[in-house]
Amino acid sequence: MAQKKEVFGADFIKEEIKTGPSGVYFFYGEEDYLKQYYLHEIEKAVVGDRSNVNFKRLTNDEFTPGDLEEALNSASMFDFFAMAEEDNAGKLVEIYEVDFKALKPGDFTETLKILENAPSDSVVVIYSTSAEMPQDSKPHQNLTRELCKVTKAVAFPYESDAKLCSWLTKIAAKNKIEFDPQLARMLIERVGHSMLLLKSELDKIIAYVSSQSRNKVALDDIYKIIASNKEISPFDFANALMKRDGARAFYILSDMKSRGEEPIIILSTVSRVISDIIRVRGCMDEGLTRAETAAKCSMHEYKVKLYMESLRNTSISKLFSIAESASRADVMLKSLPIDSYTVLERLICEIAGVK
């Protein structure tokens, strides 16, 4: 089998699309927005759009080495509905959100061989999210390493604050709205580094500012739009606690308090979420797939996917520590004559190390 190859970034795939995509690409990492963007760009460059007869997407439910081999070796067809003949110049096969851990070892080995010997007239993109390829799981790290050997591997980590600030201000500028970089940084602090979420929240802010016949985002706009439009739940609160993100946890608690959510209900939900997450983390440590975890924990597979994505950098020991803190807060809330929200604020301070 081929030796370990270099892992590239977004700049590499951008140049590949300019010169013409070729070979087998493996997209993985945390940043789904960029992965989706460059996947669509490859689709446009190779087949025009997904309606082209030379486009084939293999998803988790229908993927086998045999299906992949058939898709790669089938002859390209002329698309009589295409606007121009050049739209039929290539063939594109997407391996989309396939859980390779669920494959039998022999099937995975066979898949690697097929990819390594993919015909030159086909472009292949393996598209995975952190749910399929969690990089804090050793079995999945091994799978990623093997896939990198037979592909042009392209990693998409979260972008830096500086790049995200620049991206957000440029989007606003295209809409004739001035967005100060400091306010952009505040948006990142409130929403996180997911470009999908940031774009969604920025679109709301731009729409609101435009409706006010203004051309500049103000500080109050962020407070007003994010607080009123972003649905924040006890799950988000638990997630902030797991990350020991005190600022985010205090913001979420303030939002839930303003909406009149009862502290005992908040803590009860947080405890239940932590319990579920501990079970999922345990399954991840055992190397179980998303489907296996969903079956073992009696959860919907999509819910397991969300949990797995939130647990990328969270160990089981950290979760147990958070669970113990939540248990102490529950006893305090039910037994001491103290303001209930103060108990939750102390919980944040204890877990996040805020003084």
Image (cartoon, rainbow, N blue to C red):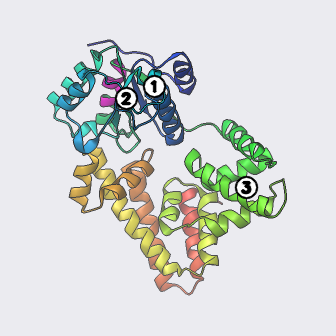
**Quarter assignment of residue 207:** bottom right
Q: Mark 2 points at which residue?
A: 79
Specify which label sits upstream in the sequence, 3 or 2: 2
Element carrying mark 1:
helix
- Looking at this view, is 205 or 74 the one in front? 74
Task: Tell me the residue at 57%/52% (across/down).
Answer: 197
| Cα separation between marks 1 and 2 | 8 Å
For the residues bearing labels 1 and 2, Cβ distance under 8 angstroms:
yes
Task: Tell me the residue at 66%/54% (across/down).
Answer: 203
| Cα separation between marks 3 and 2 | 41 Å
Relative horizontal placement of residue 89, taking residue 100 as reference (left or right) = right
Element carrying mark 2:
loop
| Cα separation between marks 3 and 1 | 36 Å
Amino acid of disc 2:
Asp
The percent coordinates of residue 169 (x first, y second) are 75, 43
The percent coordinates of residue 80 (x first, y second) are 38, 30
Q: Mark 1 points at which residue?
A: 87
Amino acid of disc 3:
Ile
- The circle drawn on residue 206 is 3
Q: Main secondary structure of the magenta part?
A: helix
Amino acid of disc 1:
Asp
Which range of residues does the magenta coloring cover? 143-149
Quarter of the rendering occupied by the C terminus: bottom right
The percent coordinates of residue 318 (x first, y second) are 43, 53
Quarter of the rendering occupied by the N terminus: top left
Specify which label sits upstream in the sequence, 3 or 1: 1
